[in-house]
Image (cartoon, rainbow, N blue to C red):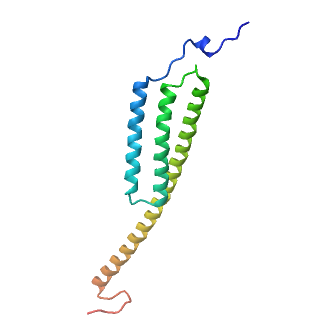
Amino acid sequence: MKQMGITATLGEASSLVPIWLAVPMAGVVMLAAAAHILTLRHGTMDHRRKSIRTAVAWLTLITAPLLAVAFSIATTDQPKIFILSWLGVMVLVSVILVLALSDSLVTGREVRTKLRTLQQQQRQMVREACARLMQEQTGQDAHGETTT
């Protein structure tokens, strides 16, 4: 009995997306990632968040053309190129997802810290306003002494 390969069972392998579509799309993604990197340089955000987002943008610059290759050039007729390109895409996308998760955790921690600070400031302002109101109504200062 003769063994049939992938191309014999599936017919002639073709790319998933035409190259004329994949390459311009990858170019647009790469331009957006490059613009993001340039924008991050001038941002005023936390150093950790800026580092994570810069790393994600650089990885996106690498992933976009590799994804274009995987979608438009790599076919099952060339199993080595097909497997390596899709394996590379999966690894890079996984790293990007892990970095995005860490960015969201760092951002959440920063938001909670700022929220606590704002709540403390708000409580202090309310205490000061109450003390002033009491002083105006009773004619006494915060220590109970009468003012004129």
For the point 42% across and 30% down, which residue is it? 23
Q: Position of residue 112 (x, y in %)?
A: 47, 61
- For this view, does 109 lie left or right of residue 141? right
Determine if residue 107 is in view.
no
For the point 54% across and 13% down, which residue is it? 12
Rendered-image quadrant of the N terminus: top right
| On screen, residue 18 above or below 84 | above
Residue toward you, 19 or 114: 19
| On screen, residue 114 above or below 142 | above
| On screen, residue 102 above or below 147 | above
Looking at this rendering, what residue extends furthest in the right direction?
A: 1
Residue toward you, 108 or 101: 101
| On screen, residue 126 above or below 52 | below
Rendered-image quadrant of the C terminus: bottom left
For the point 40% across and 32% down, which residue is it? 25
- For this view, does 24 lie left or right of residue 76? left
Total of numbered circles in the picture? 0
Q: Position of residue 110 (x, y in %)?
A: 47, 60
- Asked which quadrant contains residue 130, the reply is bottom left
For the point 31% across and 92% down, which residue is it? 146
Looking at this rendering, what residue extends furthest in the top direction?
A: 1
Q: Position of residue 13 (x, y in %)?
A: 54, 16
- For this view, does 28 lie left or right of residue 59? left
Q: Position of residue 60 (x, y in %)?
A: 47, 42
Residue toward you, 74 or 102: 74
Determine if residue 132 is in view.
yes
- Asked which quadrant contains residue 11, the reply is top right
